[in-house]
Structure formats: structure tokens, C-alpha cells
Image (cartoon, grey):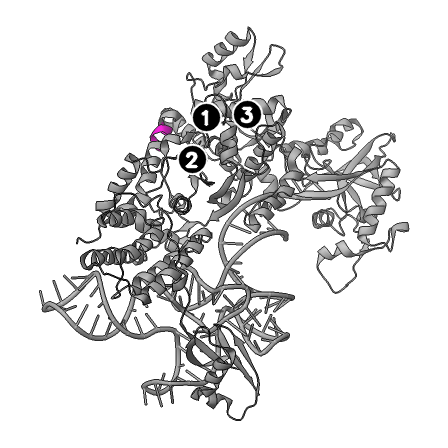
RNA sequence: GCCCGGGUGGCGGAAUUGGUAGACGCGCUGGACUCAAAAUCCAGUGGUAGCAAUAUCGUGCGAGUUCGAGUCUCGCCCUGGGCACCA
């Protein structure tokens, strides 16, 4: 028999699987139970597949093969999130159309995925930039539009005056444009928003229904950021004292209101401009407003010191004690959150404290802690009120309730729940994205283009170089098309959608990717959705998962789907690091190319090593020196197969069967729980044990079956050498023979006062008395018990004996 | 600052969830084969002492609970990642 050589067999099986349609699935056949295992689909970049993809796609591929062998009909699709900035930037630089780049890159990704042995049916793939897909992205947008889930609002954007274009947050480096280095300014432009905040509460509550990592759930909850509080109206006493004017603030800590020593408005707060004439130091205030306006979000985030300006001639009255307080405008208060104004309590809020220190404002303590020793500020939650008139001596919690009621009764405020979550801005002034299917009447009224005009295609006659308007605005074809359909004077919407929209519903389309009549036939939705297992990187913890969840909830509301959550089970894969434990990056030059590794070690070894080196959710250190371990393992499997073919043992060694069956049991459980690292080590143990022991072909075939999801190529090759004509993929998962699971004799440690002093061999079902007797006869145990009195003996069946002695 | 993780041999990691710490793999040491090397095979491999049996220390540090702690509790230290002035 020849030596194991991955180069000779892997391509062969990849071709065979494809030609025989091994990965095809009849999506209408209902005879078996379904399972839907989903990958986060890649953006097809010019660099090709990276090692992170390799890991996560291998993980889902193993699960797919495993589930199939267990008798499920498994949907395991793949596609491409192909709209996006890199292709457009490349087009601006080289003039090559993004469609062309994208197509080329997709072909390369598919080649790479096949070379890893991934079991996708690419005839059923989806490509988000393909009109047959974005047709339905637009259709869903239309549904949202008609059902009041979309609205047009003003949004603040980063604008590069030199490039004449909107810049994404990640392209702003230190307040400057990544490409040309010009200073970025803030520009307000109108855009479309999805009403994600309508679902804020549901997005928190429904996390209880899914099996996700706890930290991911927590992060989602924190991101949505629910806070319960009260609004409070502070009357404005400007010089001519117009009593009907108020500053309304939002606070979660109304119990601290007697400690309020000033009030702060966000620079965006409309009141500032409204009372402009009454502001004595308007010049100074105006200067600050302009300054704040030109700051990018990043600048404001990164500011080390709080800044602000006192508004002279303006005071705010605390409704509880009539105290007249100074009013500031400061950019540490955000216009879009709460009411855009806060009551500042420097004694009990860190930001207010910092600000008060800098501007020498009074700090008034109104909460006394139960435990004065504690320096933990959080404990103010449980403090007692002081210096708060009739509310003094109440607990914080009681005071919060009573004060809110008092405010409500006097029309000075009300209970309110705020969310940190904002509505989702989906408009992008880009070319390479899904066109927003909206047109405007000559009067400027927005109208959905209508189902009959979908797909509302991306025009071809567009110059990519930015000139200050959205690229689509330059298309004569788009303008002509709009006027032809809707009439003279109608204008097309020229923005495209955020690419997160494309990826917020793609998992629905996989169930019915070629449907031309609907986004997915209802029987298919019913059969395949929701996703049973979703595997992908933790970097999508916030946005992607939240948006996809929003989509499903919004679609359910308008009757398009009938489930609440898209992904029932979610698991993350860890990062792949270089051999020094560092992140791989182009700039560091430490990027490992999967193609090279597959050529060198083979797809089976790459798959196996990825899974073996660390638990799936942990970081994997890619060290080429270590991969030889799994390669040697595969060689041993190969050699054992050769030996069996040559000798054809009549029966298997019983000792080996007592290892094989526990191995099958453990590997089955490990794969089911995605603990691939221990599954591999278990199989290594078996192969090591099989040395010099007889094993029949039939028993070895059971082993091949459990190895096949992880290392499919070598297993199929051996299967064929064994004279089998079918494919391992899709065969039945081996069952465990109970009679070989039970251990006959076990080694039992004997402890004296918790320390192991001897080991005895006893039968597995030894009685407590027998075991104790044997233990006490041991020489070393006797020695350790000398001069001591045995207090008690603890016997843990099949585990150990501990003799407690004094 | 806040949130979420993680500290176990020379290295990646395992430990049935409170029951033999270091499975499996890499590396290393010695031996076999070879003119030699590579590959392969055999043996060994946490530290210290000992020829050995064995003893002793040992899961970031310090306490605690327990017959028994890598695992539980409390307090520290170090470290990785994410988010950012959300009132």
C-alpha cells in the first residue's frame, strides 16, 4: 500500500462530491427532521479567504456532516455579502467596475472553499449584489415603508470637504480623512431610518428565548441600554421671566435633585437658539456652538477634558426648592439622548463632578451611605436622603417613587423609559450598494417605486470619482427611467442602503434562493426557519445580530414571518493568531494564506488542526510546527487501514472494542456540543491504542465514520479502498454497543486525609466494604495510618476512597 | 471609566462540573534502524531530593468553606478584547 499523500486524494474527492451531487438537498422533501446550520457569509475581498473563515466554516461543515449522518435533512448554505466599500474604493482607484471585481473575487472564494472540502451547494448560493437578490431587499424595504417602519430624518455625517463625500466612522483617523488627510467636518443631511427603537423592549426580552453565549446576550442588552427615569421641568427665569418656558431634563436619579447645582444643555438643544436674544454672552456661546458642531463624534468621544460655556442671563429653577441655578451649554451632553438636557448633581455623578471641579461650581451631598467605610459609589443606590427637605430620611428607592409621583401630580414631569439604542440610519451616499427603491414627486413627496418596478436596478452609467453628490445622482439613465415611469419632474432617490440591510435577511432567502415570486415561499419558511445553529465571529455581537433580530421582528409584525428570533443557537469562533499570539494583519505581514497551508498539509490536516488546537470559542494560535501532530495521526489511520486490508482479521480484539465504543460515545457527545478539540484527541487515543491489536474492517469502518466529518477526504479514500461504492457522507452514524462501555476493572486511588497514598485495582462494581477492606490492607496506607485513628472513610463509587484519620 | 473574557509544565491545551492535576498534541532527552542524516519505531519527560520504593512542593497571589478545591466564597495582582461622556 502506498504512503498517505493528501495531494493525490483531496482534489479527487472534491470533484466526486460535486459530480455526484453529494451536497444537494431537496428543500421540499419533508420526510426527515430538518436542521439549519448557518455560517456568517463573507464579504468577497480581493485577499481571499482568511484563516478566521477557515476555522468557522470548518466548524459548521463538521456539524453539517454530523447531523446528516444522524438522519437529519440539513440546510447548510453559503453566499456572499458582496456590496460594500472596498470594491467601490478599488473602482475609484483603478476604474475597474465593482461588479467585475466582485465576480472575480467570488470565484476565488468558491475555489478556496471547495479546496477545504466544505460541503456547500454553490448552485444555491446567494449574492447580495445580484439583482435577483436585491430585488427582495428592496421589496422588504417597500413593505417597511408602507407599514410605517421607515422614516426620513436628518442625520449627522462625517464630511470630507476635499473628497467631497461622506466618510464612514472607521475611515476617520484622528479627525482626519483616511484617504486625503483633510479635516473632517460634520454635515447634516437627510436620510432614511429603520425604526429599530420601536422594538427595543422586545429585543431585550426575547433574548430569553435563545441559546446564545451569556456574554453575547449581556452585550446586546447593554447596547440597547434601557434606563428608567423621570423627566423634570425646570422653569426658566430669564431677565423678563417668561414663566411658560421650561428646560425639561431626563434623570434616572431624581432622588438626588436637591443636590442639583446647575443645569446643562447639549449644544444641539433648540432652546439655545430660541432664546438667543436674551443671552448676554451670545458671542461666546455662539463660538462654542460652532466649535462643538464641527467636532466629529470621535473628537467628542476622545475629549479628555470636559468643556462648556455658562449662559449668562439664564437661570433654571429647581421645582422642588425654588432654587435658581446657572445653565451651561456643554458637549458632554448629547442632543439626541433623553431630552438633550441634564440636571447636574456633581456630588453623585462623576461627569458632573469633573465639570463642577473645572468650573468651580458648588457640590452638594444629598445621599448618606449606610456603610460610610465603603468607597463604592454604586452604593449610593442604597443610601438615605439628607438635605432634601420633606424627602430627607427616605431611602433612595422610596424617594425616587415619591418624587416622581409629586412631579406627575404637579405637571412638572413624568416617568420615562429611555433607550441608548438609536434608530438605524440606512442611507449611504455610495454607488456599490442596494438602491433605495424610492422616488420623489415634483412636490417632493416620497413614494415606493412599486413591486412591478423591482428590481430597481443600479444604473450602469455612473462615474465613481466623488464630486460632492451621491454617485447615482450623476446617472442620466436613472433619471430617465424615473421620469419615464412616473412622469415629468419625478426624481429618483440617489442613496443606496447600508450593507447591513443586505445581511439582515439573507438567512431567509437561503431556504428559497431562486424564487422569483417572493422573497421566500411560505412553505419553505415554515420548513427551514428559524436557523438552528449560527456560527460566526464575536465581532458581530452588536450590529449584525441586532439588525437581523430587528428584521425578523419587523417582518413578523407585518405578517411576513411567524417566528420571533432568527437564530435559536449561536456560537462564536475565536480569533486565529500567528505563532507569537499576535493578530494577523497585512501591515504586520504575518497573514497566513489558507491556500498555502492546504497545499502543504492538505485540507484534512488544516481542518483537523484548526479544531484540535483550542476550543472553538477560544483563540487559536496557528503554528505550522504543531500541525505535524495531526498529519502523523492521519498517517497512522492510513497505515492501520492498510494493515487491515492486508491481514483481514477475523475478529477484533475485545480490549480494543472496549476502547472503540467509549470513543464513539465520547466523540458523538463532543461533536454535538461543538467540543471538537477533545473529539480529536479521543480519536488519537484510539488510533494509538489500536497499534498491534486486531481490528476487523467492519469495526474500523465505525471509526472512519466518526472521523469523516472532521477529515472527510482521507476517510472517503479508505472507504473506497475497502471496496465500498457509496459515499461516507450521508451514511448512518455508528451506534454504540453498550456491552463494551462498562469498565471491568478500575484503578482506584486511596487517599489518606485527601492525599493519594496508594492505588488499587478493583472490579468496577466493587462494593464499598470490599473496597475499604482492600484499601486498608495496602502497605503504604498502613504506614500512613500508623499511630492514627481512622475517623471515617469516604467512598465515591468508581472514583476514590478517602480515609480520614487523626 | 464601563462591560465581557482569561491566568494550569518549555509551548497549545485536558480535567466526567467538588473526587488521581497535566489527557491528547508539539517540543525536548535517551535508545533502535542508518555509512550518515531525515523519516519511523521504543522509552522517558511539572519542580526538588533519592538508584529506587517514596517523600515534598505545585493550577497568578492571599485568606476561607470542605474528608477533599484548578473547580465554590471573599479580597488582591496581572492580562486580552469590546464600548465609549446615555444623565
Instruction: Give the image quarter of residue A203.
Output: top right
Q: Place residue B11 in its image quadrant.
A: bottom left
Of badges 2 and 3, the one in the foreground is 3
Residue B74 higher or lower than A252, as above or below: below
Q: Quadrant of the C terminus of chain A?
A: bottom right
> What residue do we see at 49% from left, 47% from top?
A571
Near-viewer residue (A805 or A602): A805
Q: Which residues are magenta?
A: A101-105
Sequence-earlier tag: 1 or 3: 1
The x, y position of residue A127, in whole percent, is 42, 29
Work out whether A62 lies above or below A122: below
Of the two numbered discs 1 and 2 on the same chain, state the one appearing first in sequence.
2
Q: Position of residue A689 (x, y in %)?
A: 31, 65
Q: Are marks 1 and 2 on the same chain?
A: yes
Q: Which residue is label 2 attached to? A: A43
Q: Are marks 2 and 3 on the same chain?
A: yes
Q: Which chain letter goes with mark 2?
A: A
Distance in Å between CA atoms under marks 2 and 3: 22 Å
In space, the residues marked 1 and 2 are separated at their CA atoms by 15 Å
Mark 1, secondary structure of its residue: helix
Gap between marks 1 and 3, in whole Å?
A: 11 Å
User: Could you tell whether A416 is left or right of A754 in the image?
Assistant: right
Q: Would you say the residues marked 1 and 2 are in contact, meaning their CB atoms lie under 8 Å apart?
A: no
Q: Of A3 and A344, which appears nearest the observer?
A: A3
Pick the front one: A32 or A368: A32
Disc 2 secondary structure class: loop
Residue, disc 3 = A140
Residue A375 in magenta stretch: no
A446 relative to A326 in the view: left or right: left
Disc 2 and disc 3 in contact, CB within 8 angstroms:
no
Label 1 belongs to which residue? Answer: A133
Amino acid at each position: 500500500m502506498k504512503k498517505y499523500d493528501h495531494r493525490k486524494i483531496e482534489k479527487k474527492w472534491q470533484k466526486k462530491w460535486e459530480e455526484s451531487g453529494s451536497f444537494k438537498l431537496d428543500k421540499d422533501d419533508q420526510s426527515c427532521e430538518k436542521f439549519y446550520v448557518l455560517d456568517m457569509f463573507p464579504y468577497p475581498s480581493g485577499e481571499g479567504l482568511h484563516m478566521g473563515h477557515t476555522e468557522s466554516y470548518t466548524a459548521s461543515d463538521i456539524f453539517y456532516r454530523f447531523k446528516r449522518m444522524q438522519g437529519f435533512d440539513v440546510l447548510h448554505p453559503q453566499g456572499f455579502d458582496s456590496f460594500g466599500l472596498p470594491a467601490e474604493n478599488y473602482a475609484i482607484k483603478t476604474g475597474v467596475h465593482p461588479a467585475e471585481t466582485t465576480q472575480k473575487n467570488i470565484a476565488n472564494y468558491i475555489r478556496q472553499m471547495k479546496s477545504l472540502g466544505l460541503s456547500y451547494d454553490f448552485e444555491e448560493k446567494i449574492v447580495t449584489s445580484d439583482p435577483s437578490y436585491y430585488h427582495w431587499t428592496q421589496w422588504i424595504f417597500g413593505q417597511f415603508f408602507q407599514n410605517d417602519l421607515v422614516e426620513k430624518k436628518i442625520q449627522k455625517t462625517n464630511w470630507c470637504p476635499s473628497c467631497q463625500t461622506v466618510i464612514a466612522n472607521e475611515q476617520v483617523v484622528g479627525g482626519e480623512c483616511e484617504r486625503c488627510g483633510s479635516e473632517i467636518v460634520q454635515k447634516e443631511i437627510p436620510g432614511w431610518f429603520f425604526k429599530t427603537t420601536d422594538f427595543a423592549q422586545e429585543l431585550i426580552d426575547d433574548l430569553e428565548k435563545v441559546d446564545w453565549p451569556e456574554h453575547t446576550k449581556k452585550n446586546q442588552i447593554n447596547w440597547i441600554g434601557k434606563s428608567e427615569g423621570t423627566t423634570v421641568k425646570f422653569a426658566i427665569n430669564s431677565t423678563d421671566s417668561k414663566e411658560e418656558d421650561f428646560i425639561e431634563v431626563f434623570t434616572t436619579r431624581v432622588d438626588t435633585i436637591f443636590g442639583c447645582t446647575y443645569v446643562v444643555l447639549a449644544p444641539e438643544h433648540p432652546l439655545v437658539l430660541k432664546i438667543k436674544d436674551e443671552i448676554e454672552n451670545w458671542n461666546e456661546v455662539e463660538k462654542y456652538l460652532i466649535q462643538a458642531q464641527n467636532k466629529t463624534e470621535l473628537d467628542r468621544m476622545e475629549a479628555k477634558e470636559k468643556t462648556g460655556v455658562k449662559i449668562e442671563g439664564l437661570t433654571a429653577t429647581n421645582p422642588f426648592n425654588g432654587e435658581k441655578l446657572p445653565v451651561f451649554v456643554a458637549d458632554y451632553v448629547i442632543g439626541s439622548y433623553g431630552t438633550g438636557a441634564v440636571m447636574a448633581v456633581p456630588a453623585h455623578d462623576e461627569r458632573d463632578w469633573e465639570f463642577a471641579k473645572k468650573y468651580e461650581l458648588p457640590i452638594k451631598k444629598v445621599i448618606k451611605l449606610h456603610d460610610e467605610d465603603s468607597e463604592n459609589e454604586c452604593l449610593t443606590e442604597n443610601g438615605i436622603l439628607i438635605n432634601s427637605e420633606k424627602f430627607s430620611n427616605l431611602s433612595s428607592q422610596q424617594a425616587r417613587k415619591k418624587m416622581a409621583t409629586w412631579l406627575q401630580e404637579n405637571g412638572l414631569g413624568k416617568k420615562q423609559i429611555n433607550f441608548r439604542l438609536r434608530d438605524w440610519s440606512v442611507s449611504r451616499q455610495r454607488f456599490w450598494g442596494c438602491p433605495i427603491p424610492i422616488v420623489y414627486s415634483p412636490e417632493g413627496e416620497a413614494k415606493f417605486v412599486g413591486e412591478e418596478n423591482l428590481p430597481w436596478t443600479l444604473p450602469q452609467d455612473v462615474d465613481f470619482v466623488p464630486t460632492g453628490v451621491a454617485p447615482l445622482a450623476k446617472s442620466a439613465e436613472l433619471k430617465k427611467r424615473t421620469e419615464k415611469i412616473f412622469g415629468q419632474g419625478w426624481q429618483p432617490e440617489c442613496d443606496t442602503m447600508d450593507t447591513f440591510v443586505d445581511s439582515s435577511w439573507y438567512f431567509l432567502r437561503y431556504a428559497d434562493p431562486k424564487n422569483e415570486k417572493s422573497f421566500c415561499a411560505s412553505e419553505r419558511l415554515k420548513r427551514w426557519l428559524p436557523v438552528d445553529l449560527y456560527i460566526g465571529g464575536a465581532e458581530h455581537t452588536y450590529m449584525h445580530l441586532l439588525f437581523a433580530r430587528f428584521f425578523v421582528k419587523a417582518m413578523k409584525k407585518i405578517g411576513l414571518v411567524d417566528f420571533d428570533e432568527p437564530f435559536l443557537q449561536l456560537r462564536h469562533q475565536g480569533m486565529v493568531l500567528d505563532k507569537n499570539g499576535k493578530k494577523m494583519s497585512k501591515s504586520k505581514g504575518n497573514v497566513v494564506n489558507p491556500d498555502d497551508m492546504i497545499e502543504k498539509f492538505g485540507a484534512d490536516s488544516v481542518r483537523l488542526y484548526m479544531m484540535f488546537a483550542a476550543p472553538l470559542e477560544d483563540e487559536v494560535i496557528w503554528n505550522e510546527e504543531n500541525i505535524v501532530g495531526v498529519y502523523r495521526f492521519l498517517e497512522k489511520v492510513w497505515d492501520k487501514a492498510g494493515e487491515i486490508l492486508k491481514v483481514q482479521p477475523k475478529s477484533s480484539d475485545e480490549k480494543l472494542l472496549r476502547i472503540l465504543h467509549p470513543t464513539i460515545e465520547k466523540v458523538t457527545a463532543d461533536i454535538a456540543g461543538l467540543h471538537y478539540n477533545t473529539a480529536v484527541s479521543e480519536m488519537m487515543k484510539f488510533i494509538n491504542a489500536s497499534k498491534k491489536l486486531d481490528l476487523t474492517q467492519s469495526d474500523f469502518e465505525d471509526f472512519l465514520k466518526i472521523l469523516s466529518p472532521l477529515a472527510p477526504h482521507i476517510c472517503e479514500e479508505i472507504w473506497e479502498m475497502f471496496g465500498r461504492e457509496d459515499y461516507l457522507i450521508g451514511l448512518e452514524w455508528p451506534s454504540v454497543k453498550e456491552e463494551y462501555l462498562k469498565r471491568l476493572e478500575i484503578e482506584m486511588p486511596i487517599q489518606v486525609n485527601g492525599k493519594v497514598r496508594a492505588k488499587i485495582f478493583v472490579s468496577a462494581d466493587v462494593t464499598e466494604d470490599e473496597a475499604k477492606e482492600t484499601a486498608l490492607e495496602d502497605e503504604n496506607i498502613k504506614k500512613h495510618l500508623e499511630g492514627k485513628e481512622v475517623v471515617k472513610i469516604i467512598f465515591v463509587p468508581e472514583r476514590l476512597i478517602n480515609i480520614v484519620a487523626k
